[in-house]
Amino acid sequence: MDGVPTPLRCFRDCHSAEMFVDDGVQTVTSVEQKKVERSIEEVISVYKQMHNLPQPTLLREQHYQYLKKGLRHLSDAYECLDASRPWLCFWILHSLELLEEPIPSAVASDVCQFLARCQSPTGGFAGGPGQHAHLAPTYAAVNALCIIGTEESYNVIDREKLLDFLWSVKQPDGSFVMHVGGEVDVRSAYCAASVASLTNVLTPKLFEDTTNWILRCQNWEGGLSGVPGLEAHGGYTFCGTAALVILGNEHMLDLKALLRWVVSRQMRFEGGFQGRCNKLVDGCYSFWQAGLLPLLHRALFKEGESELSRQQWMLDQRALQEYILLCCQNPTGGLLDKPGKSRDFYHTCYCLSGLSIAQHFGNVDLHHETILGSEENRLAPTHPVYNICPEKVAKALQHFHRLPVPEDRRQPGAPATDRPSDPDAASDTLS
Ligand code: FPP
Ligand code: ZN
């Protein structure tokens, strides 16, 4: 590769030392792993044949067109996400803000009106109009409204009822169920802490015992599981860690064990991350796993581990960017899990979020960027706790902190209907 200005990891040596060795024992897992590595080798070899200068390019325009269309029209393939419609708003709007593409004001206003229809009369947001409130779409809707960041979008959120809803899903042991009568896992603690902090309804009472419950999810592997006692997984590890950051208690984790676990999830051949030990690389973990590194960096620094936090940041930023740019882009727009998979808005959002993390974090100087390829590949930075752009976090906090925290007299599991509600407002949101 003589003459190439910035040699790429895969272009240097992608055939030997970094590939998986099964020691002569074939299992379903080892066969799948080798298949993925071969498909990546193939992608790289095709890329090398097609391009003289191996500088991977972000297909900005194609992604922009794919996202723009998705805001107005979704194919039949999205029918299964009928209970996740605020997520589609968030995935698309966040991808657009990372690409620094403005959202036309008419589109922003339509999204606000749609999300208002997803707001439940008992507080929180549902997956679609007329459905029951659930913490996951509540998180997605609040994030989407904060990305829009206008008076109209902030005013959609009924904060008093949001607090009622959060109490209705709070459990006496400090955990949260995802919806009334639903399952407990650490995603819910993150969704609750995220929306409560952004909208200034967070009270110490609401999160009483939550820290202890989350800490019980960190297991012997170093990562966190969905509930205490299960296998560590990147999605849950991100949620638990980010929730503790919001609650100011991340120092209570075993930070070094967590760091060891997460850096071991970056695949040495593929460059992307796996979600858990012995599983396959997937583009979406570029955010759920790599997003942990800025959180850990800050936590270790605060703990006085300046030596550790000064070291080259244990995330191979270039390898991750290479995986996303070479293996996760659909040539007609949108990003995906791994070669051979279809594009979708979830993977588009989290591949781009991970690409942003890999470009902007992981260095001694957090403001220093490491952009693989040309400047054109540069994305806007993302806030590693909320995963929306930092200025949108600041603007939302500024807006909602001007308003008082709603009075908090509630108890875990309290029905969300305690507060007398305005019947007109309820019919407005469901129309
Ligand atoms: C495993 O799927 C996936 C999980 C067990 C949950 C993942 C959780 C998240 C991505 C976090 C969601 C966050 C919020 C805010 C709601 P799998 O077995 O298909 O994948 P794998 O083989 O990669 O583990
Ligand atoms: Zn995925």
Image (spheres, grey):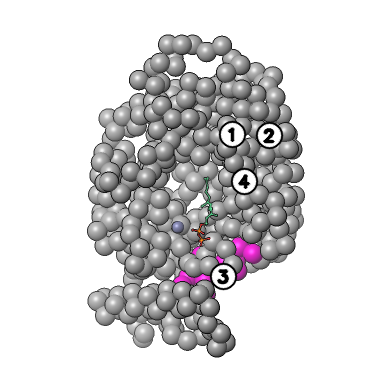
Sequence order check: which comes first, mark 1 or mark 4? 1
Identify the residue position indicated by label 3 in the image: 278
> Toward the viewer: 131 or 422?
131
- Percent across and percent down for residue 9 are 45, 77
- The type of residue carrying mark 4 is Val
Q: Looking at the picture, which amino acid does disc 3 mark?
A: Asn
Which mark, residue 186?
Answer: 4
Q: Viewer-nearest of labels 3 and 1?
A: 1
Specify whether residue 308 is in view: yes
Element under disc 3: loop
Magenta-highlighted residues: 261-273
Query: Crowdedness of circle 3 by 10 Å Cα count: few (<14), some, many (20+)?
Result: few
Question: Mark 1 and mark 3 in contact (Cβ < 8 Å)?
Answer: no
What residue is at 59 percent from the left and 34 percent from the top? 181
Q: Label 1, on which residue?
A: 181
Q: Position of residue 201 (x, y in %)?
A: 60, 27
- Few, some or many residues within 10 Å of mark 4 (<14, 14–19, 20+): many
In this picture, is 307 found above or below 392? below
Taking 417 as reference, is 13 left or right?
left
Which of marks 3 and 2 precedes in the sequence?
A: 2
**Residue farthest to the bottom?**
24
Q: Position of residue 46 (x, y in %)?
A: 29, 77
Which is closer to the viewer, label 1 or label 4?
Answer: 1
Which residue is under mark 2? 171
Amino acid bearing label 1: Gly
Query: Looking at the image, can residue 298 be seen?
Result: no
Lower position in the chain sequence, tag 3 or tag 1: 1
The kind of secondary structure the magenta stretch mainly shows is loop
Q: Distance from label 2 to label 1 (Cα)?
A: 11 Å
